[in-house]
């Protein structure tokens, strides 16, 4: 992953919200807009701006438009990832009822064939409810995706697990559970504190993980990964998104864009995530953060 170029770059025409737009969170669950959408902006403007900031918009534009045309507008979830110095992206494709043939890994591979080879082959009888993959600034130059992520639930509760699939096969990567931040706080806290990566004997750690500025969200997701823990806050407004981007040091041109267009995004709910663990000295460190929208 190349380091981010901290330049504003050329201005891209902003895409307005339209009367046929649909509104989904990062689990592709529908929501009602916070404000009337007339005169507002589509969430995908944030994705395009992040690609501009990273200097790879021209490489990504045609493939992402092909994905959007393949599935339909608003049905692809994107995540912008940042580790403090580098941006990259993840695309997520949902079909929990296994009723949309276009959303299978096999069909998506065919849709992207002119631009990118999806190397892992998925047995479509696996009851996955979502597939995703990472994209880096040079992914289309390299020409292939070598790792897919498959997500399964097998339960009526808001919980699941994810596996990576690469040339060596499947590997369990992540277990996660969605909960109400206030109504289920008695379940959130024990799950957070059940950790091999964070010593919660330090009373400051909890506030560093369950950030008070983001706690007024709709849902919290607690995840346990192979080398760290993670927490996701679903359903925050654009003001809290802007706080999040500033708090975690996202590139200035991206932060400035959100600040300048805040009014255009005030009808949307956003989702954000944080990967974290203790370092060798016992201090909590943030390994990666992310924010999400739909294309």
Image: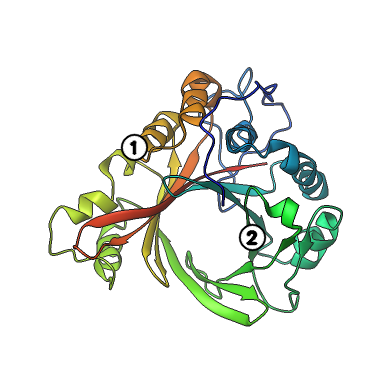
In the image: residue 189, left or right of residue 10: left
x 70%, y 47%: residue: 75
Q: Quadrant of the C terminus?
A: top right
How packed is label 1: few (under 14 Cα within 10 Å), some, or many (20 or more)? few
Secondary element under disc 2, as helix, strand or loop, is: strand
The picture places residue 94, in percent across and down from the top left corner, at: 66, 58
205 vs 35: above or below: below
Let me know if residue 229 appears in the view: yes
The residue beneath circle 2 is: 133
The picture places residue 135, in percent across and down from the top left corner, at: 64, 53
x 72%, y 43%: residue: 60
The picture places residue 179, in percent across and down from the top left corner, at: 39, 58
x 81%, y 58%: residue: 102
90 vs 8: above or below: below
The residue beneath circle 1 is: 247
Tell me, yes or no, whether the two marked residues, 1 and 2, touch with CB atoms within 8 Å: no
Give the number of marks: 2
Seen from the viewer's position, the closer of residues 231 and 40 is: 231
Q: Image quarter for residue 117? A: bottom right
x 42%, y 64%: residue: 177
In the image: residue 295, left or right of residue 107: left
Seen from the viewer's position, the closer of residues 248 and 188 is: 248
In the image: residue 210, left or right of residue 76: left
Q: Residue 261: which disc?
A: none
Let me know if residue 99 appears in the view: no
Secondary element under disc 1, as helix, strand or loop, is: helix
Seen from the viewer's position, the closer of residues 96 and 272 is: 272
How packed is label 2: few (under 14 Cα within 10 Å), some, or many (20 or more)? some
How far is mark 1 from mark 2, CA to CA? Answer: 26 Å
In the image: residue 252, left or right of residue 14: left
């Amino acid at each position: 992953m190349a380091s981010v170029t901290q330049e504003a770059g050329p201005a891209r025409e902003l895409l307005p919200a339209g009367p046929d737009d649909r509104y989904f969170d990062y689990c592709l669950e529908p929501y009602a807009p916070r404000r009337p959408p007339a005169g507002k902006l589509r969430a995908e403007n944030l994705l395009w701006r992040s690609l501009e900031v990273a200097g790879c918009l021209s490489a990504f534009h045609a493939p992402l438009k092909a994905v959007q045309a393949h599935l339909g507008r608003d049905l692809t979830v994107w995540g912008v990832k940042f580790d403090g110095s580098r941006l990259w992206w993840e695309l997520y494709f949902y079909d929990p009822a296994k009723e949309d043939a276009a959303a299978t890994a096999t069909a998506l591979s065919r849709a992207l064939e002119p631009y990118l080879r999806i190397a892992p082959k998925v047995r479509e009888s696996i009851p996955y409810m979502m597939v995703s993959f990472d994209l880096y600034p040079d992914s289309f130059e390299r020409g292939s995706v070598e790792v897919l992520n498959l997500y399964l639930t097998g339960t009526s509760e808001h919980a699941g697990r994810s596996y990576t699939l690469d040339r060596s096969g499947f590997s369990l990567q992540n277990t996660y559970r969605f909960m109400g931040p206030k109504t289920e706080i008695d379940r959130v806290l024990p799950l957070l504190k059940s950790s091999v990566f964070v010593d919660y004997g330090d009373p400051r750690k909890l506030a560093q993980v369950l950030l008070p500025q983001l706690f007024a969200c709709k849902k919290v997701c607690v995840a346990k990964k192979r080398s760290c823990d993670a927490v996701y806050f679903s359903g925050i407004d654009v003001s809290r998104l802007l706080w999040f981007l500033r708090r975690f040091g996202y590139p200035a041109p991206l932060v400035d864009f959100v600040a300048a267009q805040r009014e255009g995004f005030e009808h949307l709910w956003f989702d954000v995530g944080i990967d974290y663990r203790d370092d060798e000295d016992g201090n909590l460190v943030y390994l990666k953060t992310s924010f999400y929208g739909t294309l």
